[in-house]
Amino acid sequence: MTGTPTGHATASDQRPVVLDGSPLSPSDVARVARASLIAPVRVELSSDALARVAASRAVVERALESGKAVYGLNTGFGSLSHVRIEHSRACELQRNIIRSHASGVGEHLPREVSRALMVVLAASLARGASGVRVETLERLVTLINNHVDPAIPSRGSVGASGDLAPLAHAALVLIGEGDVWHNGRVEPAAWVTTSFGLAPLALEEKEGLALLNGTHMMCAIGALLCHDFTAIFDAAIAASAMAMDAAKATDRFLDARIHDYRRQPGQIEVAARLRGLLAGSAILPSHAENDPRVQDPYSLRCTPQVLGAALDAFRFVEGAIVRELGAVTDNPLVFAPSAGNAEGDIVSGGNFHGMPLAIPLDMLAIACAHVAGISERRTFWVVSGFDKFVAHKPYLATDPGVDSGLMIAQYAAAACVNEIATLSNPASVTNIPTSAGIEDYNSFGATSALKAMQCVPLMRSVIAIELLVMAEALEAHRPLKSGAGVEKAHALVRSRVAKLTADRAPSPDIRAIEQLIASGAFGAA
């Protein structure tokens, strides 16, 4: 994503991703999207998928021969669906729908999102319910494998009749038009595809609509975010455990009996993970007696409740995305012949509507707000030096007054939290009709996805700052050590960032920890 570390652990797994009709996983999407020419991850089509696509196309061909009006085959689109289109103008119609719908504006999506979109689209078409030709699907896969990645403006989708504008910009490349990423720049697709020996495709009935009429941008972004959120959440758990010993908190509030009575699965899991990370800590018993404090602040004591709620929310989000990664969101759908229907069938519906993703993606931004928000509060508590019992120097500075230590790192965390909070206002609750009113209730899930795409890397930065601060704060309690899990997390931070001995710019240290988080290193802590 823009401004985030990429090319992490997934890129080292170079197994091909086989499109056989089964659901993709977020990891599959991330591996293809973040693969480089040096470490490619190929996309392959199974023979079963090709057979399903051919059978689906045969149903389309029979419907055309019947002469009946079928939406998307021989009619106009949207509010123009009453207009019949003759076969002689079919290619013109498919070309025109792509050209006319390529109305995106704003900066381009990150290249990895374009690649993710393409593989999600190809996987959907490979399920054999969209009525495209085999050669059209094969061309799409050829573009992915050759890193001919469309340059797609980020704004323009209302997330209802699919992500029409972004997908139109992707489809332009199939017909030799539009722009692509090439050598780090945006270049005209015509000469790039020609250099690969790829002549423009002449699309036939249904194919233009099938390429545009799905939720593939929302789903692609969601898949990448789910992949990234998991690694960041692991780091957030590690940072929370580090904070508890850094602040000399009690572990009484992690008692399993407390959390069992609340019955919330995320809370129970987070408390258990924190107990595991702190197990064997020598810091906890060091202040078991004569500690004047009665209770710890909510940012420590209620970590299982807050992070647990965020985890439960994320699992809802992840479930929606994973289901979508196995879906077909085209319209109309083409059903191959079966025992009950020898001729097959073509049925119009509304699978292109983005609401099943819009609400979860809005929820993902809210989850980010709370994971980051409580992290910043723990950082504030430790760097402020309020609790004299803990005996941290203000801002963890080496020589407070002369040195400012990590004072402004907390400012940066606060700025990120404020931005996430601003972005957490849901997009899916506002409707603006389109297409002369025939499309009268839109999801705006694309906006939900774009907002979440900003929130996740901001959350990563906040957690990186907490890890930086807590690694420093734990040093103040030496020679006492925390639990093995916490010490492992501390060692990970120290593998990239040296102990503070005098003021230095924290920004490079924060970036180094962000890259460590993105690598998934804290998942093993």
Image (cartoon, helix red, strand yellow):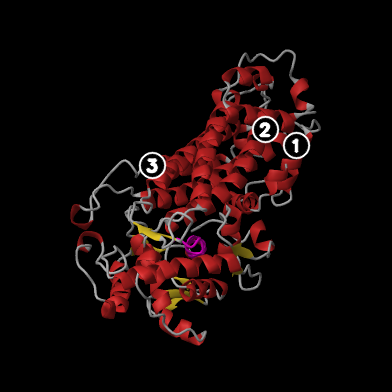
Position of the C terminus by quadrant? top right
Q: Is residue 410 above or below residue 10?
A: above
Q: Is residue 342 above or below residue 134?
A: above
Q: Which residue is mark 2?
A: 241
Disc 2 marks a residue whose amino acid type is Ala
Density class for disc 3 (Cα within 10 Å; few <14, some 14-19, many ≥20) is: some
> In the rendering, at what x and y percent does residue 278 appear?
73, 30
Q: Earlier in the sequence, mark 1 or mark 2?
A: 2
Disc 3 marks a residue whose amino acid type is Thr
Q: Which residue is mark 3?
A: 422
| Image marks 1 and 2: residues in contact by CB distance under 8 Å | yes
| Image marks 3 and 2: residues in contact by CB distance under 8 Å | no
Disc 1 marks a residue whose amino acid type is Gly
Query: In terms of secondary structure, where does tag 3 sit?
Result: helix
Query: In terms of secondary structure, where does tag 2 sit?
Result: helix
Quarter occupied by residue 274: top right
- Residue 120 forms part of the magenta stretch: yes
Give the extent of the magenta segment.
Answer: 115-129
